[in-house]
Amino acid sequence: MLNGGSKGNRHTPLTPWLIAAIAVCLSSGSCGKPPQEEAAEERTDSVQTHRVSEVTDSVHGEVPTPKTVDGHPEYPTHKHIVWPDYPQEIKDAGIEGMVFVRALVDTDGMVKKTELVRSLHSVLDTSALEAVSHWEFIPLMMRQRPIKTYTAVGVRFRKDDLPLPDYPEIAVDAGIQGTVIARLLIASDGGVAESQIIESAHPALDRVVTEAATHWKFWPPGESNGDTVMTVMVPVRFTLSGGVRGGPKETWNVRPEGRVELVWPKGYLASRRRPGAAR
């Protein structure tokens, strides 16, 4: 309730239009700015802003079809997705949900800046921000030209998304560990049309990741020049613990346990960030 500023302690209820105005103000980050400053920023950056409530894309699952203007979407559509880290200890703790990230999409479709809109957990917040900074979009068009756009995406963390492969017994016996990175081309129905291993750990590990990917489902991709196009990069890390000594099983004191999780190698994404991209 807001104080109406009149007789006694009477209060004026928040009307629907006032609630909507506050939501727009908060999501656009323009609360409290003088009109002249807002206008100057719009002229300088030619940036369009979309509220979180308007863009409810998730990293997995149903995605609403965007409204279109002259055949173009009102906000950028995904072209290339980098899957976020989802460490096993976070899954085991039962932590699931959505992290909302606001991103500035440049005219080339690359993400130039990210900021946290709604938090879930510190580890997953960081994971979502890092992943989205490497996403690529089909940029918003205005008068037949691409423009900068602020958009918001929901990065969903759910234990049942992307069923992971079992750790191959042959790899456990040989003490083989590492991260397999797959690049997937998404079909028009959201299934995986093609998969390519761009970072190999071992043929046995590569093979089970490729097989698992045939069962993964994503949302249907957007279109570019009439063709459906979306790729996804996914890391699958295999680690052994509880007795492995860095060699074959003859050197073990006890049989190790294998862990499979969606985690990027440390520093991998940072080393591939282009100059001037989001941090």
Image: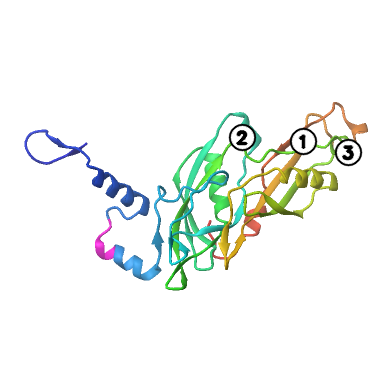
Residue 245 lies in what quarter of the image?
A: top right
The magenta segment: 33-37
Q: List the residue tagged with mark 3.
A: 174
Q: Hey, which residue is sitting farthest top in the picture?
A: 254
Disc with the residue nearer the chain's start (1 vs 3)? 1
Q: Is residue 207 left or right of residue 109?
A: right
User: Which badge, 2 or 1, is on the more N-terminal residue?
Assistant: 2
Residue, disc 2? 159
Q: Nearer the viewer, mark 3 or mark 2?
A: 2
Within-10-Å neighbours for mark 2: few <14, some 14–19, many 20+: some
- Give the image location of residue 139, x and y in percent: 50, 64
When the figure is inspected, residue 145 is found, relative to residue 88, above or below; the finding is below
To which residue does mark 1 refer?
166
Q: Amino acid at mark 1?
A: Asp
Residue 140: give x, y in percent of width and height: 47, 64
Picture coordinates of residue 38, whole percent (x, y): 30, 62
At label 3, which amino acid type do we have?
Answer: Ala
Q: Is residue 260 left or right of residue 14?
A: right
